[in-house]
Image (cartoon, grey):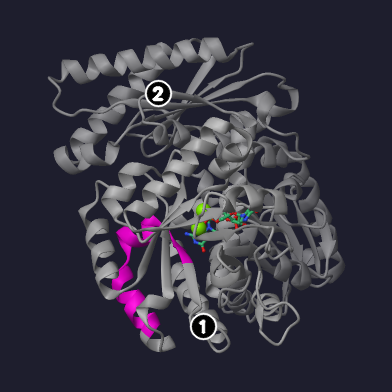
Amino acid sequence: MDNKKHKTEDFSQLFDMFCEIADTFAPCMKDYLYVYNLTEDTYYISEQAVDRFLLPSNLFQNVGDVLSVLTHPDDIDMLNEDIELVMAGKKDFHNLEYRWLGRDGSPIWINCRGRILRDDNGKPQIMLGCINEIGNKQKADNISGLLGESAMHDMVIQQLPTLTNAMFLRVGIDDFKVINERHGMEYGNYILREVASRIQNCADSQQYVYRIVSDEFMVLDLSDSDYNKMNRLYHQIRSSVDELVASEQYKALYTISGGLVALEDIKASESEYNRYSEIMKTSEFALTEAKLRGKNQLYSFRPEEYTAFLRRRYIRSCMRKALSDNFRGFDLHFQPIIMTSGEFLFAAESLLRFETPTGEKLSPLEFIPILEESGMIIPVGRWILRNALEMCKRCREFYPEFMISINFSYIQLLKSPVYEDVMRALNEAELPPSCLIVELTESGHLENSSAIQSVWQKLRALGVNIALDDFGTGYSNLINIGNLRPNIVKIDRGFTIKALHNKYEYELLLHVIKMVHSIGLNLVVEGIESRMELMQITAMNPDYIQGYYYSKPCPKEEFIRKYHPDSSRTSG
Ligand code: C2E
Ligand code: MG
Ligand code: MG
């Protein structure tokens, strides 16, 4: 730099000139060029950065404020420290790896490099340099010899504005981890290379193959393709890989799953980046579905199934938050179980409720399976036990014989020390085991599990009452009365309704009640909604009735208000 350039106004001209140069080069490169005029607090960056990052525009002022919003909160201190060193003249070169936030708020790793131009007095005037996305560096994969995810990203982003039709087939090697574990990484890499080459051989000239993550590949078809063509391609790949397995004398056994997504199934979005990210998420979902459904198969993406998956994921995350926030959102409702003779209050069934942070009340039929599959039913089950027993204790103050009925999930029985939990909860509440009824639905797991049978026997020996729930549905039948030896059988509303409308089913229910009584068990009929239904069912002489006719499940205080002897209504 000669003497003339050392004046401040010349730095201003320099800034303009660098901006022009950056503008000229930007379309030819993937990296982002930037120029920062420190005196005027003005920042310029290649225009395509605005599509990618949380930037107000590609030329802006108040740089500190913008950077503090743009930079990942965990990286701000590190960035400021480095900039301070540069400003203090202790460094002339800025080279830092940290995270900016993308337009959708997700973190994106960048490497920002830049040099400082100073005036005669050593004061920093301009910083200029280049930013690249670290995640983009790995464009090719040396193991499979294919291009990597980053190359696919560029290709798709470039094509998306003009594409009307495209298919994405995500191919995964099933149980690849086992191959690595049993035969070593080297053999694993050999399989990856061979599978990659077979996928490539099956693909035609308009189908591009990439390796996207460890054992997953993507075939991108930009021609006027359809499900049938991609289905054929998947089967060709599968046969070819089967041949590979055979040619290796079955040294390692593995199969191939595929998830297929059509561009038309991806919802429109303002930005190509969002659309690409949606393609990646849906193809991942599709491949996971194929594996969940038994592997070695193709799953074609169905938007409604994806919506249901997202909903389950949303509910799961709401419930996780609730668990870490002292179960906020969970509540127990109580429904009376009334003794048929004399219409006395005998017990209450506790029924779990959940409300999302936005106030949506969910049905247990929707959220209990999610609690079960995620294992959250175990802590929630303990919370139910504690709260239901607390309610029992309160009601026993005015009905000393009052019992509480709690639904148990077979997951609780299989995976948590239910017997110990019940003992501890009863001790803490200072209640006898006889005040507790444990309801269980058969779900195909009971009769085969000796662990469940043993918990059951221990609970029964302790004096806890056992109820077989949902009797008369596909899940609960006579075999379970033999296997589980319950004290109480609960007739499901589905069976009750049929009996009310069909003579044959009425006779059947009548005989079930007689049979249950003849072996000394008690019986609850669920789902009685009207006086008429009550009359018809009580004629069959069941022991207890539960249903909307007496009360819908209601919150604790409402239940106490209804059934407290001091209130106007003391029973049924
Ligand atoms: P369930 O244990 O058979 O509970 C009885 C269900 O029937 C309850 O539905 C109750 O509100 C409903 N019901 C009772 N009387 C009537 C009636 O007269 N008419 C009609 N139409 N319905 C009636 P809810 O509360 O929606 O619970 C559904 C199922 O969710 C329960 O069936 C149970 O299997 C499960 N569940 C509920 N709470 C819990 C819990 O705390 N733990 C576990 N593991 N499962 C629970
Ligand atoms: Mg029940
Ligand atoms: Mg039931």
Q: Does 137 sit left or right of 70 as displayed? A: left
Which one is in front, 350 or 140? 350
Ligand 1 visible in quadrant = bottom right
**Label 1: how many Cα within 10 Å (few below 14, some 14–19, many 20+):** some
Question: Which residues fall within the magenta stretch?
Answer: 406-426
Verify whether residue 421 appears in magenta: yes
Please state the horizontal and vertical placement of residue 529, each as a whole percent of the image.
69, 52
Verify whether residue 569 appears in magenta: no
Residue occupying the far right of the picture: 9
Prevailing secondary structure class for the magenta stretch in the rendered image = helix
Which residue is at a point 59% across and 32% down the rendered structure image?
502
Which residue is at a point 24% across and 57% down the rendered structure image?
453
Residue 361, above or below 384: above
Say what secondary structure mark 2 lies in.
loop
Say what secondary structure mark 1 lies in.
helix
- The mark found on residue 297 in the picture is 2
Please state the horizontal and vertical placement of residue 261, each as a whole percent of the image.
57, 26
Please state the horizontal and vertical placement of residue 213, each as a whole percent of the image.
42, 39
Which one is in front, 215 or 294? 294
Residue holding disc 1: 390
Q: Quadrant of residue 224?
A: top right
Q: Does 149 sit left or right of 267 as displayed? A: left
Closer to the N terminus: mark 1 or mark 2? Answer: 2
- Split into 4 quadrants, where in the image is the N terminus? bottom right
Which one is in front, 423 or 136? 423
Say whether marks 1 and 2 touch (CB < 8 Å).
no
- Split into 4 quadrants, where in the image is the C terminus? bottom right
- Numbered disc in front, either 1 or 2: 1
